[in-house]
Each structure stands twice: as C-alpha cells, then as structure tokens.
Image: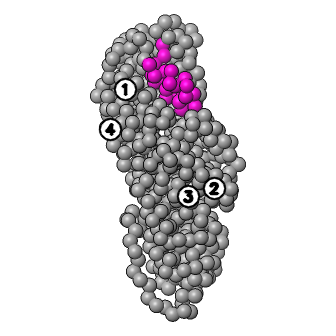
Amino acid sequence: MTPAPDDASDASDASDADTAARAALAGDSDTALRLADVALRTGAGADRLLGARVLAAVLPQRGLLARAAEVHRWLARQDAGTPDAVVSLLGTGALDEARGAVAPAADALPGLRDGADTLTAEGLLASVDGRDITAGTSLSLLVRATTALAATGEQAPAADSPAALGALLALHRGEPELADPLLDLAVDADLGGPALRRRHLLLRAWSAMLRDDEPGARAALAAAAELPGAPEPRDALVTVACEVALARRAGDTRRLLDLWSRARQALLRHPVDLYCLLPVGELAIAAARLGESRWVDPHLAEATALLAGLGDPPSWSTSWHWARLHAAITADDRAAAGDHAAALEDAARTNDRAVAPARAARVWLAVLAGEIDAEAVTATATALRAVGLAWDGARLAGEAAIRTTDRTDSATLLACARALQAGRVPTAPEPLPDAGPSRAAAVTRARREATLTGREREIAELVLEGLTYREIAGRLFLSTKTVEHHVARIRRRLGSESRAELFSELKVLVGTGP
C-alpha cells in the first residue's frame, strides 16, 4: 500500500487524500473516511487512488469489509490493484478474485512493505486452499510478513496487520501459544499505529482467555479500554464477545444478561466476515444459554454460507463448528449438534488440530445420551487442553460426572475437571474410602439428580463468589433462612460432606451451563 505522506510536509499544501491518510494512521476514522471519499469523488490521478486506498483500509474497521472489497475491485480496474486486496476479498468469500489479486503490479518496488503485503496475501490463501494441512505454510508466511513489516518502521493505513491475521488463524486452530509472539511483536513495533493498537490488545485478551488466563485477559481488555477514542465496530464486537466468554466460563449468568444488550448492538453494527467468526461463535453459545438465539441466527446463516463458499477450510471452520456444537448442546438441539459433530469429523481428515474436538464431539453426544465411559471422557477432556480448549474439557468432564451413576467414575471425572480448571494435566484421584452401601447409594442418587433449578443456580454462583448467606439474601431479596435451605438442599443432592467439597463440585456444576 502507498505509504502515508511525510508528516513534515506543509499541512497547508496537503491534499484531501494526504490528510485522509494521516487521519487514518492517527485512528481518526471519521475524518479519514470523509476526506478519502472526497478525494475519490473529486480528486485526480495519484490523489484519487490514495483516497481509494485509504477508504479500503479504514472501512474494515467499521465492519464494512464487503465495501472495502468493492473499492479494491475499482482499484484493480484502474490497474492500481495491490496484494493487500486479498484481505478484504478473501474475508468476504471472494476466493477466485483473491487468488487473482496476489500478483503485485508490474511496477511495484520489491521493498519490504510490498513484500509484506504479498506474504500476507499468500499466507491467507494458503489457509483456505488445501496447502495448510499442518498450518505450517500459512502461519509461516504471516510470521514472515509481520517481521518484514516491523523491520520497515514505516506506517501506512491498512485494513489489518499480518500479526493480527496470523494470531486469528492460530486462535482458530487452538494454538494461542503461536498467537502471542505475533501480537507481542505487533504491540512492540506499534504495527498500524493508533488505528490498530486496540485490535492487537483485544486479540491478546482473546488468546489469554483461551489459555484460561483470566487475569491476563482482563488486563488486556483494560489496556484496550484505556486507549483514546471509542472503539470501532470491529473492536467493539471482539470486546463484548471476550467479556461474554469470560462471564460464561465463570458461570455468571447475571453478567451475561447485563452484557447481552451490548452484544446485540455489536452484532447489528458488524456484518459477518471471515475474521469475526470467533466472537460471533462465542455469542451464539451465550445466546443459546440466554434463550436469545433468534438474534444471532441470521449471522450464523451468513457465516455458514461464507465458509461453504470458501470450501469449509478446516483451519477456519473447526472453531466455528465447535462453537456451533456447544450452542446446539446448550439449546438441547441434538440434531444440530450431530451435524456439527459430523463437520468436525470431516475437518479432522485434513486438520490435525481438529482431531481432539472431533473426538470430543462424539464423546459429548454419548454423554448426553447417558453412555458414559469415564476413561474415554478423561482422555478426551485432557486432549482438548492441548488445543487450547481446557475449559471445554473441564466442562465435558463435569457434565459426565453429574450424569454417571458410578461413584468411582464420578470422583475420577470431577478430579479431571478440577485439574483442567486449575491448568494442570489430570491425574488419577485418590481411591475413595469405603463409605458402605448406604453412602454409595446416596451419592449415586445425588449424581443422577444433580440438576440445579434457576434459583439454585443463582445462589450457587453467589456462594462461589464468596458472599455470605446474609449478603446473598440481600442481593436476591430472600430471607437468610431461605438461602440456607437452598444451600442445604443442593448439598444433599450433590452428596457433599463438607463445605470445601461443596465448593469444588459447585465450581464444576455451575460452569456447565443451564
């Protein structure tokens, strides 16, 4: 992309296109879009082309990737197309056009920036065209693009950075450990300047969340919130989806309800594209839990059609089908869950990172059908940890623990869930003492019947927050005696003999969804 004009130039001589480029770099998207549009409509020659390129760079931040793709098509008709068009074209499903945009213009300089744009384009294409069986090709290209761009020290308006795109791909594949170095480099080198600072910090938050690093995720969200200016629609969608994900993992239904209005607004402002599938998938799960699926169904249909148009590339579709599987399970839609489990099986044939989710999908459906193999569940839940899905593995083990009628299996599965929640590799639990047939039968009945009512779940969540019975009563407008009665009933149904055991089991149970 053509670099922004030198800041040292006389501002009074700057054209609308020059000023638009400077505004885009400074993160002033309103000014950038307004002046770039003027340059495109009334300018001539290089100014007109620069105005178009600024538009194509800033529109994606507004969630208008399809409009940016149209601008790139216009540039191509002016013989001024560049490889960075691939970001917008591929992101909106125009695969054939994206392939045709890779070749740089004949007069393009073989510099670091042009090379970075080409590497980024080739990396994105490799992620969808079958070359990316192990992700080595696409991620390698995007890492090289990031390194080249950081080495230039040059800033220019851009729709996205290769670091953000590489991090997204790594997160889709369940490899946050590969996303973090890219994002660290992007933050350190300030790739994209103020316009992309929030983008990189928010992806850091998402990566930390997948690694079950809640403090790290919240710190990154806080750092992004401290940046000046209101977030663009793309950033607003990622922000609220990350907050929703943290609330869901904490079993905080009240927080989910508080966030849902913001989530709906973010969805309305941001059309679906390839690069927003992670937040949309997370909101689909939350919507199913809150009974609000009608708000996300149109977006889910668009995303499914987009992936189908790209040939359902496993590097991007695995996380999508995993999210849709959980939304279907939460909504008790067994048919849809089966469809997404089958899609994960298909992805596993060419994507090594899809093997664990595909197996987990089969095991999860078996658990829901009452067929619980504790050894298979434990192995599967542990395997999910290796692909950045430790929380999901804990949920699977917890779900199986409360459904099995075997006391030993229940203890094994609860131990597995607790270990995964604590970030450890599960090990075999200590043998349970022989409590006699009456105690064993009581535990068996408790496990079989351990489904919390809505009021019990509210109380359980507040117990886990550390509130006293009096504080819980005040918050829920109940009497202290009523709260004590609910907790006692929960303890009896779970078969918990101590407060510590109750806390451990509630932490697993409350986090499993409604």
Label 1 Cα crowd, 10 Å radius (few <14 / some 14-19 / many 20+): many
Above or below for 227 versus 221: above
Q: Are marks 2 and 3 in contact (CB under 8 Å)?
A: yes
First in sequence: mark 3 vs mark 1: 1
- The residue depicted at 58 percent of the width and 21 percent of the height is 70
The mark closer to the camera, 1 or 2, is 2
Looking at the rendered structure, which numbered label has been put on residue 116? 1
Residue tagged 3: 361
Looking at the rendered structure, which numbered label has been put on residue 185? 4
- The residue depicted at 56 percent of the width and 9 percent of the height is 42
Instruction: Tell me which corner region of the image, top left, top right, bottom left or bottom right, holds residue 194.
Output: top left
Element type at mark 3 = helix
Amino acid type assigned to the residue bearing label 1 in the image:
Ala
Looking at the rendered structure, which numbered label has been put on residue 337? 2
The mark closer to the camera, 3 or 1, is 3
- The residue depicted at 56 percent of the width and 58 percent of the height is 361
The mark closer to the camera, 4 or 3, is 3
Above or below for 337 versus 237: below
Q: Are marks 3 and 1 in contact (CB under 8 Å)?
A: no
The N terminus - image quarter: top left
First in sequence: mark 2 vs mark 3: 2
Q: Nearer the viewer, residue 218 or 212?
A: 212
Classify residue 8 as left or right of residue 322. left
Label 4 Cα crowd, 10 Å radius (few <14 / some 14-19 / many 20+): some
